[in-house]
Image (cartoon, rainbow, N blue to C red):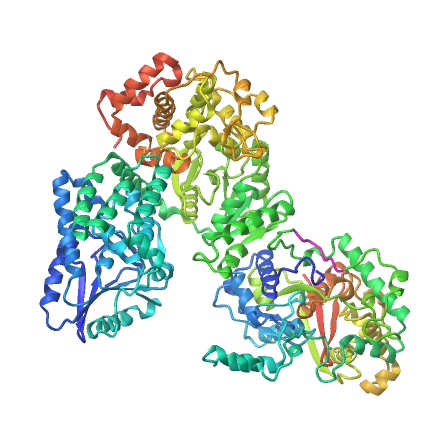
Amino acid sequence: MRAGTMYFDQIAYDLAREVLKGVLVRNALEPAGIDAVIMGAVVQNPATSNVARDAALGAGFPNTVPAYTVTMACISSNRAIADAVTMLKTGQAEVVVAGGVEVLSDVPIGFKKEVRQKFFEARKYKNPLEYRKFVQGLAAADMLPQAPAIAEFSTGETMGKSADKLAAAFGVSREEQDAYALRSHRLAAEATREGRLEPELVPTALPPKFEALTQDNTFREDSSLEALAKLEPVFVKPFGTVTAGNASPLTDGASATLLMTEDKALALGYMPKAYLRNFVFVAQDPGDELLLGPAYATPKLLDRAGLSFADLDVIEIHEAFAGQVLAVLKAWESDAFARDKLGRERRVADVDMDKVNVWGGSLSLGHPFGATGARLVTTAAHRLQAEDGRYALVTACAAGGLGHAMLLERYET
Amino acid sequence: MTYFDVYTKNGVATVWLDSEGERVNTLSQPVLKAFGSLLDTLASDTAVEAVVLISRKKDSFIVGADIKEFAAFETREEVVKLIGEGHTLFNRVESFPKPILAAVHGACVGGGLELALACHYILATEHKRTLFALPEVNLGLLPGLGGTQRLPRAVGLQNGLELMLTGKNVYAKPARTMGLVDATIYPQGLLDAAKRAALGLVDGSVASKVRKTTLLETVLTKTPLNAVVYSKATETVQKRTRGNYPAPPKIIETVRVGMERGVAAGLELEARNFAELVFTPESKALRHLFFAKNAAEKNPLKQEARKVGTVGVLGAGLMGAGIAQMSAQSGFGVLLKDRTLELTAKGKGSIYEDVSKRVGRGMTSFERDVVLGRVVLAADYTTFRGADLTIEAVLETLDAKQSVLREVEAVAPADHIFASNTSSLPIGDIAAASRRPETVLGMHYFSPVPKMPLLEIITTDQTADWVLATAIDVGLKQGKTVIVVGDKPGFYANRILAPYVNEALVLLQEGAGVDEVDAAMRDFGFPVGPLKLIDEVGLDVGAHVMQVMAPLFNERGISLVTLGDNVLNAGLKGRKSGRGFYRYEGGKGKEANPEIYTLLGTRERRTVPKSEIQERLSLAMVNEAVYTLQEGVIKAPGDGDVGAVFGIGFPPFLGGPFFYLNVQGANHVLARLERLEAQHGARFTPAALLRQYAEADRTFY
């Protein structure tokens, strides 16, 4: 849900409980048999800094199931799933629930460091007069609460500006960005209408209103190129190209996947959907290539798996910004990029858009930072079945110049 | 028999209260006697400087006196003497030369609390199971071991009266605030802290009973203004009991005398009043109910019960949501389903609201979340493959019941149990749609489910024993008082309610007033009058239930008054429609609705004597209860008493219809019924079984 709308009353712990409970119920899973719960989260509520543990307990998981929270910006739940895979492969675990959560309606508002220091000192104050010391050396403006910005700490640059820059570097026009955003919204609307997303959505009814919610409210069915063209740039004014219309919305959401070793799944009577075959994490310059991770991660993954891009039937790429997706696609299709940056003879791919995000993407389905990765993996697994494909690629960029790619293979029955 | 283990070390004698072979500690006569001898030993043992009383039972300290002993009492003088001995013993504790400390974990109730109050210091654990109460009033008694004197002195007059007049539980933290408890600690540290506190009492480093009192409290306790407190308490008691319960006024009297004339005078009156109350029919009836209810909270088929982890609930209306709530609160996973997800969500919302009322009162918001998290919204039946038992509370038609039964059975596992919460349909008819009729039974709850304690479980000829056993288990875990009844129209509670309500309607037709009838029955001891009750249930629902039962009564030559279409079409459906026997629009539903007289075809208005209303209504119900026993709808009189009191509010001080018969005498009631039969016809034809009992001069207990 768009932040500030249907989940405005919730905190991350609330939505995380819903998906954890959903995994149990949907799979009639005995929670005592779970070896670990791993959740990704980015903007954390200080009261539940290990939200995976608090939510697992709140969802009624036995207190004997270990749970932890990972944070790796927008690929946090990819990291959670990757951790789970590692645990399963090394025999550390047989059953893991991995997912993520983000409630951007609940951003922690803090005080400046100087004020926080005063609060710390004030705990030692003995008599009321000492509180005079509290205000000494502080200006009234210092007391203003500080909301965190979505900006890169090392460069100070907002993520929107980075996307704007990246699009320009790859020659992606405003029109192309708007057209891609429109495609994302239309596809999301179509997939919702046709009920394709239903199997991966947990309906919720939460306090205080207990309204039954069964689908996302992030996509716009009635969008048009004309409407998108009218929007002003948000991050680089007046000549930038990234607008509210071609960027992903601030979103509240949570996701969870149920991962098992094949033997365990079959022994428990489950029919697996897909194998998680391989994954890579990469990193590059957070200044100029902040969101270009997929361009590097994907060829690395394919090399490792001994596959070529053409072997992929399903592609799920995280859509932080339309400009960022298009830049990645251009990088994949560029011989020059392959030569200069990847040290390869030829370009990585000729991309067939019929394989890319055909049920919508983060632009239209929303981008709850910590939860997006597990949604991508779930959609990829479901698409493999719906489209009768064999291999699926999940790839995503993240703040810090981080990137990720994962290879799924459909489970043959 | 041993009751204590004593270990003395470093000057502290630790007295472990541990009645041999018992689940809990009670204060029986032998225990008190043994305790007296123990005090002698502790007094003379020079190695003992201080004493700690602590229980070895799981989560309980002392749960009170041994109530079973009361039945053997014969004379007041005997009781006064026994109580006097108890007083002497507890006075000895209070003035013991060495400090005695009560280290309380778990229930500290009745005589247990009175003992603790006599000690020099109370240390309690901060734990859910640690609670303090003087519930004697619920048994028609007053605290007889000094509680009426020591409690108000410990916690103030207002708190003290409230605790004794309601019998309510006080948990450790509020008990500390109130001054009942001197200090609290986590359970793991109880013994060690108790020993240190006991030695502290010896050397003076720990002071006992240091409670700060507010000025207001001092004024209301110690000045003539305390008259306000007494009169307020008397007024509240009168309003609540309508003079039917003798214990509360005696409690107030005893407290007042003690506060005004000193502890000795107070204790003396306490003994005399206890001796008087213990022989009252009210106390006997309440004690009878206490035992009957305890019996209904045990599962006689325990061995055969199968494990239930997940309960399905179909229908998320008031009933369904209530059942789901009780299930979730008792730890079951719940699958809640209504026709649409919106309706289901609304049901979950009402559960959230009700459970949230407990947050901050012994429940944290996290615990609330966990309870609510157990209630899973089901959009379809897929998840019901994980259900062990499903209770339906859908529309009250055979079609609706049978179709949800088929739908659930299609996905549920082979040993899944299907229970119907129907109030009017035969369970056998519903079971006819089942592929496994042996797994079908009735679980009939009363509205509002979280508040009403009774659960009727209805079996058919085909219901398997393990199915019944499992359903009883689930009901008991949900905190219900369970009776097992036969599959006849109305089952038990509604069956005996029918002729009672019918008689109220007949009286209206004869010209009696709505409020007149209701007030008479409230004076008789029912919590609400019969007509107000129908307004709450809904006239349409009531009419439907009466209609279902009509043939059964027709067979006996009785035609029930029908709340015909003219009433319902006029929009009179009770509280929910704003009008019924009373008017709710704008007002509070206190004014009778004159429309009802015309619609019922009432002849001219007349005043019917209260005693006539009470006799006709109560005997119609009591007689019907005997019919149900005669027909095997209930298996034992105890079930009938529990069902009537906890299901439909039969006056507890009368002990239930069968206990009432016992007190009144079967032949006496028979004679009254025969007189009424002569006046009013078949409605009062006595049950054959009653005649048998009367002729043989037998009693039901």
Q: Residue pushed farthest top? A: B678
Residue A204 lies, with reference to residue B186, above or below; the image says above
- In the image, B152 versus A205, the foreground residue is B152
Horizontal side, residue A75 vs residue B485: left or right: right
State which region is magenta: A212-218
Residue A122 lies, with reference to residue B449, above or below; the image says below
Q: Residue at x 41, y 47 (%)?
A: B479
Q: Is residue B388 visible?
A: no
Q: Residue at x 37, y 18 (%)?
A: B684
Q: Residue at x 33, y 69 (%)?
A: B188
| Count of picture labels | 0
Residue A82 place in picture, x, y as percent:
64, 74
Which of the 4 image quarters holds residue B76?
A: top left
Q: Residue pushed farthest front? A: B224
Which of the 4 image quarters holds residue A146?
A: bottom right
Horizontal side, residue B587 vs residue B218: left or right: right
Residue A112 lies, with reference to residue B560, above or below; the image says below
- In the image, B6 versus B111, the foreground residue is B111
Q: Residue at x 51, y 61 (%)?
A: B366
Predominant SS of the magenta segment? loop
**Residue A217 highlighted magenta (yes or no):** yes
